[in-house]
Image (spheres, rainbow, N blue to C red):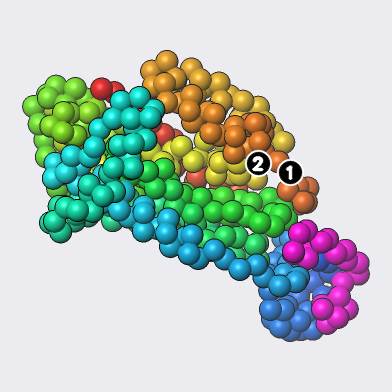
Amino acid sequence: MDDLTRCFSAWRVIRAGDREVVEGLVAPEHRAPSPDLARALKAWPHTAYWARPDRSEVVLVRPVGASRPERWALHAMLLVITVVCALGAGATLAGAFSPPAGSGVLGTLLAGAEFFPAFLSQPGEVLLSGWTFAAALLGILVVHELGHYVAAARYTIDVSPPYLLPVPPTVSPLGSLGAFLRLRSPVVDRRQLLDVGASGPLAGFAVTLAVLAWGYAISVSAPAGFGYSPTFIEIGHAPIGLGDSILTRAFREYFFPGAGSVQLSLPAFAGWAGSLITGLNLLPLSQLDGGHIAYSLLGRRQAPLGLVALLGLIYLSQYWTAWLIWVALSLVVGGWRWTHPSVLCPERPVSWGRQVVGLLCVVVFVLTFVPVPFTG
């Protein structure tokens, strides 16, 4: 540390949880950087980056104290259960398995508990009949969360491994409620927030594109009106209409120009779900990925944008009532606020290159958002 501070005209140290942040104003003679500063930065074993384009300020982050042990057993258990639920959902979509049914809240919970012995007692060909759906969907979810994880670890943010959220196909046709990870130390500035917030959706979006291309290539067309929607799936031989985003409509028109209706293959439905999840996460609300990105680009001006998004979802709930559930979940995650909390140093600017990344996320949101996900 002394080799670095000798190159600073002034510095301050911020203790944020179990992380120590050093903000150094670089002396004019070391801003190139000088050989002394370059050597000191190269020897620094943790995070270091220039805070301003003229290299007048550098930020150093390092952990202090012992690192906390991870709950690997819990993560492994959630992974295994999620894989089972996703395989069960895929087998249901493939028509190879009929999950237990229940009515009412208690009946649904009991049916969910009955799903595991009922599904796991099936022969191997049934267990694996929906593997293309499970692999595609979990690939999108895991890559999304790993994008966040890698970006957070790059800044020495104390971050947990992903927590996968399983749900039996008796409750959801996806077999998963998604995934999340925990940031256990504060985010220093809007640069860090943008990198961490944008990396997950962009990484997941790249996988979603590949999955959609694979899935639509093996989907089949159907007569107009057969699925009550231009895009549909079948569960128990009953067609369920799916709403389109700009992205999924483009894939349908490319692979099936002029088709009246398209029945999605298992990986195509996984790609549709991945696109839906990406759009949901990019809503500019509170602690969603879109909230992180909006605050990174706009600062406190994210607040009115978040309110518009909230009111927009409430309006759309007349066409799909589950939007109210998403509104409630977004508010719970954000501590009952649609605004984003401040970072430690909100005044530090975001470079134009990162602003372009943020605008790219806005484009991805426009491409993937589905106003009415299920149409019948």
Please report the residue visible at 71 percent of the width from the left and 83 percent of the height from the top.
43
Estimate the x, y position of residue 115 in percent, counting from the top left.
27, 44
Q: Tag 1: residue type?
A: Ser
The question of residue 172 being in magenta is answered with no
Q: Residue 9 versus residue 15: which sits nearer the camera? A: 15
| Label 2 CA crowd tier, 10 Å (few <14, some 14–19, many 20+) | many
Estimate the x, y position of residue 157 in percent, counting from the top left.
65, 62
| Label 1 CA crowd tier, 10 Å (few <14, some 14–19, many 20+) | some
Judged left or right of residue 282, residue 126 is left
Residue position for label 2: 295
Estimate the x, y position of residue 174 in percent, counting from the top left.
32, 42
As measured in the structure, the alpha-carbon distance from the residue carrying label 2 to the one carrying label 1 is 8 Å
Most distant residue in the right direction:
9
The question of residue 15 being in magenta is answered with yes
Give the secondary structure at mark 1: loop
Estimate the x, y position of residue 253 in percent, counting from the top left.
21, 36
When asked about the image quadrant of residue 334, the answer is top right
Give the secondary structure at mark 2: helix
Does the CB distance between marks 2 and 1 fall below 8 Å?
no
Most distant residue in the left direction:
223
Q: In the image, which residues are magenta?
A: 1-21
- The answer to whether one can see residue 56 in this image is no
Judged left or right of residue 117, residue 302 is right
Please report the residue visible at 21 percent of the width from the left and 32 percent of the height from the top.
232
- The answer to whether one can see residue 153 in this image is yes
Residue 49 marker: none
Residue 342 marker: 1
Please report the residue visible at 33 percent of the width from the left and 42 percent of the height from the top.
113
Asked if residue 116 is positioned above or below residue 241 in the image, the reply reads below
